[in-house]
Image: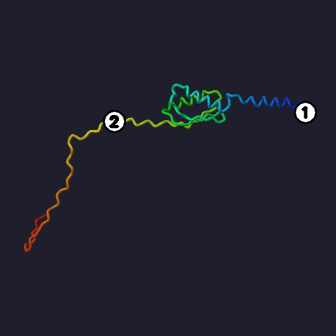
Amino acid sequence: MNLLKRITPLLVLAVVLGTAGCNPHSSDAAINSRVKAAIAQEPGLKGTTVWVSTDKKVVHLSGTVKSRAERAMLISVARGIEGVQNVKTDLVVEAAPPKTAAKPQQKPAVEAPAKQEPPAPAPHYVAQGQPLQDTGR
């Protein structure tokens, strides 16, 4: 009984100190939920799909975003959440499509005639019994 009286205050103290660090504001799951909720509520981030994970109070954002401004806004929102110590990102900004003016397809006004090969020289026939003459070709 004497031992129980001595140990009880120590057990109570251990339980109180053990639960002091387990408040909902500091757990990774709570931080993760608050970051996701903040992203969903941010008007400039409507329609944005990113993955959020939290480990040891470090938020990790990954996915594809439309612009650098959207990436910066996501990082800012995550940093603003209570309990976040750092934000790491693997956010990739989509490549913008090339800005070229569409040119209409036009046919040439006059089509050039196809190139023709010059005709082959006609063969020279010699009648039987006639001498071969030099034609100069």
Query: In the rendering, at what x and y percent does residue 4 appear?
Result: 89, 32
Q: Nearer the viewer, residue 18 or 80?
A: 18
Tag 2 secondary structure: loop
Residue 135, disc: none
Tag 1 secondary structure: helix
Figure disc tally: 2
Q: Which residue is mark 1?
A: 3
Q: Residue at x 25, y 40 (%)?
A: 107
Query: In the rendering, at what x and y percent does residue 12 appear?
Result: 82, 29
Cβ–Cβ below 8 Å for labels 2 and 1?
no
Q: Which residue is mark 2?
A: 102
Q: Quadrant of the C terminus?
A: bottom left
Query: In the rendering, at what x and y percent does residue 123 appear?
Result: 14, 65
- Please indicate whether residue 72 sits to the left or right of residue 119 in the image: right
* N-terminal label among 2 and 1: 1
Disc 1 residue type (three-letter): Leu
